Amino acid sequence: MKKNKHLTLLDRTIIEEMLNTKQRIAVIAKRICKDPTTVAKEIRNHITIKRNGIPGKNYNNCKHQIRCRKTCLCMPCNAPRRFSSCHYCSMCNKVCPEFEPQACARLAKSPHVCNGCGKHGECNLEKRLYIASKAHNEYRAMLSEARSGISYTEDELKALDSVISPLIKQNQSPHHICVTNSDSLMVSERTVYRLIDSNLISARNLDLPRRVRFKPRKKAKPFKVDKSCRIDRNYGCFLKYMDAYPDTPIVQLDSVEGKKGGKVLLTVHFVNCEMMLAFLRDANTAKSVEDIFDSLYRDLGRERFCSIFPLLLADNGSEFSNPARIEFGDDCLRRTRVFYCNPNAPYQKGSAERNHEFIRSFIPKGKDLSPFSQEDITLMMNHINSYCRASLGNKAPYDVFRFLYGNDLLNLLGCTTIPAQQVTLNKSVFRKEVSE
């Protein structure tokens, strides 16, 4: 039996094939020369959950689905098509107060997956599958992440911060803190310095009496962005969430810069209707993004905000490095979910990137945004969103948004439709002349 060896793609392919033929875990382990517990853990750690239903029947995991007669659980209804009963809609499990999950008896037995089940074509319950290629990619990604960045959860960082930062403010050195609090911290002195360097805790380098006297090493690679913000929020997690809830509307976030170091735009792009909002900010900071979403939450109200901003997909910019503050407002209730694209992968939110081409026809790249006001930016977006698109069946984004969410919500967002014959895609639409 091979020991201390990683499972290869071939091993995982054999596991999947033998699961599909209903082989026991002990037989699979013997085939790939591994311990049965290794195979069992491999299956358990890399299960793919699918909630895609079957042809002609949407996913529904409620045990009351056959005799359920509920209608109009969602008001207004946002489903692509209207159903006579809610149990035909894939969204009813999320909103019905009487939802009770239906457990498949097969999943209660080893190997706890649906591989080898001959009823896939007639089962619209949650399916748990082991897929070799996906499991191998997840494992390789985990190995890569384990060797980079700081792998602490937000709760763990808060616990470390509560011990380290007050003592730093008392002029204690990281060495003294680690020696006298080894039982509660359980981290090395070097880790404390890394936490301070990357701004993951409240203490800063300025709080260290001797730290600021030393010149930084030229070859040192500083932390660009707080990597902990992407824990459980990367693009793979986004794809898993969309597999589980495929009808969730996606809103893409990005920034459009003018002159370096000057004012910047936050763009909020609704993918399902190609409508984009733009907000002028004095600086490209995380606080400015948080303030915009707090303002939208107050103006729209919780119900409207959650209906149009259920999921946000952003890039890895520092302005989006505090996702918890965007996801939870002052009332401590979840109002949205934030996920991140992979680094250097703008194509993963290509819909927003394409829409930025319209903005550049008004504001060229590198042009200072200081002469513009929010009223100017709103007017610009009104013209862009009133422009008909072939991808929308020759409808304008405002028309599609109004059909999906209603005219009242469009008015609350400060949007005004421009007549088709008056739509202009250049800077002449601004009320005052902006100097070059």
Image: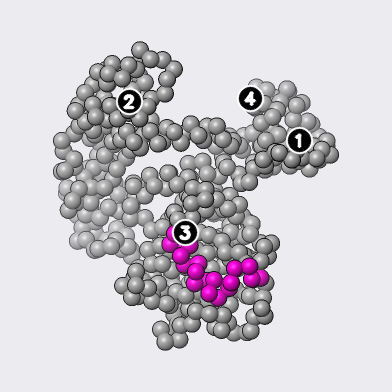
* Residue labelled with disc 4: 186
Q: Nearer the viewer, residue 287 or 27?
A: 27
Using the rendered image of the protein, determine whether residue 31 is visible from the camera's viewpoint: yes
Mark 4 Cα-neighbour bin, 10 Å: few <14, some 14–19, many ≥20: few
Q: Nearer the viewer, mark 3 or mark 4?
A: 3
Q: Residue at x 30, y 35 (%)?
A: 131
- Residue that extends furthest to the bottom in the rendered view of this protein: 421
* Residue labelled with disc 2: 11
Helix, strand or loop for disc 1 = helix
Q: CA distance from mark 1 to mark 2?
A: 50 Å
Among the two numbered marks 4 and 1 on one chain, the one whose residue lies closer to the N terminus: 1
State yes or no: discs 4 and 1 in contact (Cβ < 8 Å). Answer: no
Among the two numbered marks 2 and 4 on one chain, the one whose residue lies closer to the N terminus: 2
Give the residue type that dot 1 points to: Ile
Instruction: Using the rendered view, name the quadrant where residue 112 is placed.
Output: top left
Q: Which residues are magenta?
A: 350-369
Q: CA distance from mark 1 to mark 3?
A: 39 Å
Q: CA distance from mark 2 to mark 3?
A: 38 Å
* Residue labelled with disc 3: 252
Q: Quadrant of the N terminus?
A: top left
Helix, strand or loop for disc 2 = helix
Q: CA distance from mark 4 to mark 1?
A: 17 Å
Among the two numbered marks 3 and 4 on one chain, the one whose residue lies closer to the N terminus: 4
Give the residue type that dot 2 points to: Asp
Give left or right: position of 301 versus 226: left
Magenta segment includes 358: yes
Give left or right: position of 423 versus 216: left
Give the residue type that dot 4 points to: Met
Give left or right: position of 278 versus 165: left
Q: How many marks?
A: 4
State the colouring used for the structure image.
Answer: one colour
